[in-house]
Image (cartoon, rainbow, N blue to C red):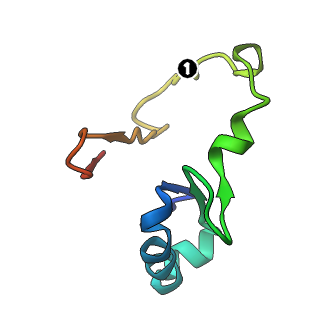
Amino acid sequence: MKKTKVIICTPNLSSCIKQAVEKSDCAREYGTQIVSLGECDGFSNLLDLMKDASDQDAPPPVTIDDPEKEKMMIFWSSGTTGKWRT
């Protein structure tokens, strides 16, 4: 969990994710936040947070001038397997 700021999970995985974050020194150091995709006690609901958002609020795409000095990480799901790739 290196330098992870936000973890988005389903309500049924939230307690497992919370345990992992509590055990991670990096997560505590970087203040990792857990957000749920639905109602879940003790976690912000991403769907509620997004209900007032619009496309006009989105910032323009980020430009990387020097990829050797500026690093980005893009996360995506591999689909229904539940595995995450970077």
Residue 15, visible in the rendered structure: yes
Percent coordinates x, y for residue 9 in the rendering: 47, 56
Q: Looking at the picture, tell me which residue is in the foreground, 5 or 15.
A: 15
Q: Looking at the picture, tell me which residue is in the foreground, 85 or 66.
A: 85
Furthest residue to the left?
A: 81
Quadrant (top left/top right/bottom left/bottom right) for the C terminus: top left
Quadrant (top left/top right/bottom left/bottom right) for the N terminus: bottom left
Q: In this view, does 63 lie to the left or right of 60?
A: left
Q: In this view, does 35 lie above or below 12?
A: above
Residue that carries the numbered disc 1 in the rendered image: 63
Q: Which residue is drawn at 70% across and 21% down?
A: 59
Q: In this view, does 80 lie to the left or right of 64?
A: left
Percent coordinates x, y for residue 27 in the rendering: 54, 73
Q: Is residue 50 left or right of residue 38?
A: right
Q: In which quarter of the image is residue 55?
A: top right
Q: Residue at x 75, y 27 (%)?
A: 53
Q: Number of marks in the image?
A: 1
Give neighbour class at mark 1: few <14, some 14-19, many 20+ (Cα, 10 Å).
Answer: few
Furthest residue to the front?
A: 39
Q: Quadrant of residue 74?
A: top left
Residue 2, visible in the rendered structure: no
Q: Is mark 1 on a helix, strand or loop?
A: loop
Q: In this view, does 81 lie to the left or right of 39?
A: left
Percent coordinates x, y for residue 11 in the rendering: 50, 61
Q: Which residue is drawn at 45% across and 39% down?
A: 72
Under mark 1, the amino acid is Thr
Q: Is residue 32 above or below residue 80?
A: below
